[in-house]
Amino acid sequence: MKQARLLNRLDAAIANSSESISLHCLQIERACYLARRGQADDARATIAEMRSRYDRDPHAMITAWLCLAEGLLIHFSNMGQQARDKVRRAHALSAAAGIIQLRATSAAWLAHMDYVAGNIVDMGKYVREAIELAEKGNHSALSRASLVAADAFHLAGRLDLAKPWYAKAHEHAVADGDDATISALMHNMAWLRFANMRQSTFNGGEISPSGQLALLSVDSTLQFESIVGADGLHALSPILRAQILADKGEFFAALTLCDKHLESAVRQGIDRLHASVLADQAWCRLNLGDVKAAEVDARAAEALIDPAGQVGDRAPAHSRLSQVFAALGDISTSRGHHELAIAAWELHSSTQQHIIDVLQAPQNNAILNFLR
């Protein structure tokens, strides 16, 4: 396993630092990176040591860095709701203390977390803030803000608008030697290719090459993660691969991956996708002739769908369950899911347009100008 350049740079800076506050900030920044790579125990140990050291004599910069590190540790361990609260505190503290570059980095991570939560307006606000405040050498803030913009445009079905942002995110991640961000970029691009393909096929569109491209992308991501040792949210790529294989008709291979990785993926916080994955699992079992197990999975998937959850997660779950219950002969339930799917896909299309409207709004000119 090759150690990342970012880790080498941080280790060198730590070794050469003689001033305690600067040294400790570098150590916490290193913990942030380890948390993103999935090395939670090492990150947690550093955070605990620094909390203990500054418990009685707090320092604004140290406290802000610790809040950011704790937020990232929570997010990349289980995507818990406390993560955003921690990062928001880091953002507020760094703003109050005038620590501009840490504020920019915190804003970029708030944008990321708002994107994940579907808070589109706040996402756009924090992408803009990160880009406006970050210096050219603040690759951490600029790579993350760029990746959020790329993912948002891609989610909106506009890969043409996403591509330059992916390129900008990659540029800054490479400049920083940040393999964790490169891995995230590869994974997100694969996931969103697949999501857009599903939107098309579940709504009667022609089968596109996006599924094969997504499969190639996720295989590349898994290989890259193995090479660099990135282990943050490590079960997500195999679950994505399983869903792609289910769509390709490779049902046994898809089930094998689900059996191995679904439980750990749910522990890592992808419960929002649990219903969709179980619906795909039911489809696989049905096509392999295990009708009873298919119905069990389908009923479990039904129970897990959150009517108030993100529409992009609900829509494919309802579409798949409509297919499953139709094949099981339960026409009434199938029709119900079909109607819910239509409504969810329509709302999803509106959300996609909302994303584009927010990111291209006049107040967000800084976002668009960043590419020029």
Image: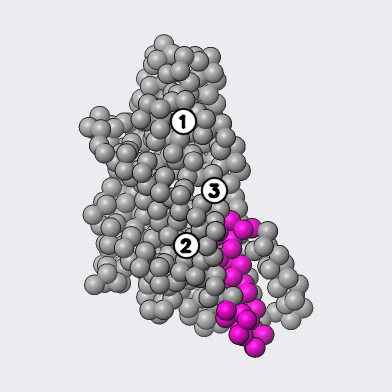
Q: Tell me if residue 15 is in the magenta stretch.
A: yes
Q: Nearer the viewer, residue 291 or 229?
A: 229
Residue at the (28%, 47%) spot, across then down: 157
> x and y percent of residue 154 in the render?
32, 51
* Distance in Å between CA atoms under marks 2 and 3: 14 Å
- Looking at marks 1 and 3 on the same chain, the residue that comes earlier in the sequence is marked by 3
Label 2 or label 3, whichever comes before in sequence order: 2
**128 sits left or right of 239 in the view:** left
Residue labelled with disc 1:
254
Q: Is residue 294 above or below residue 233?
A: above
Q: Position of residue 33 (x, y in %)?
A: 55, 65
x then y, percent, for residue 75: 56, 56
Q: Is residue 250 visible to us here?
A: yes
* The N terminus - image quarter: bottom right
* Helix, strand or loop under label 2: helix
Q: Secondary structure at mark 3?
A: loop
Q: Is residue 153 above or below residue 350?
A: below
Magenta stretch, overall SS = helix
Q: Residue at x 65, y 63 (%)?
A: 43
Q: Going 31% across and 54% down the picture, which residue do you hit?
A: 153
For numbered disc 1, what is the local secondary structure?
Answer: helix
Q: Is residue 192 above or below residue 302?
A: below
Question: Looking at the image, can residue 125 be seen?
Answer: no
Please report whichever mark, 2 or 1, sits nearer to the chain's N-terminal start: 2
Q: Are marks 2 and 3 in contact (CB under 8 Å)?
A: no
Q: Residues within 10 Å of mark 3 (few under 14, many from 20)?
A: some
Q: Quadrant of residue 172?
A: bottom left
* The image quarter in which residue 29 lies: bottom right
Residue found farthest to the top: 329
Amino acid of disc 2: Asp
Q: Which residue is mark 2?
A: 179
Magenta residues? 12-40
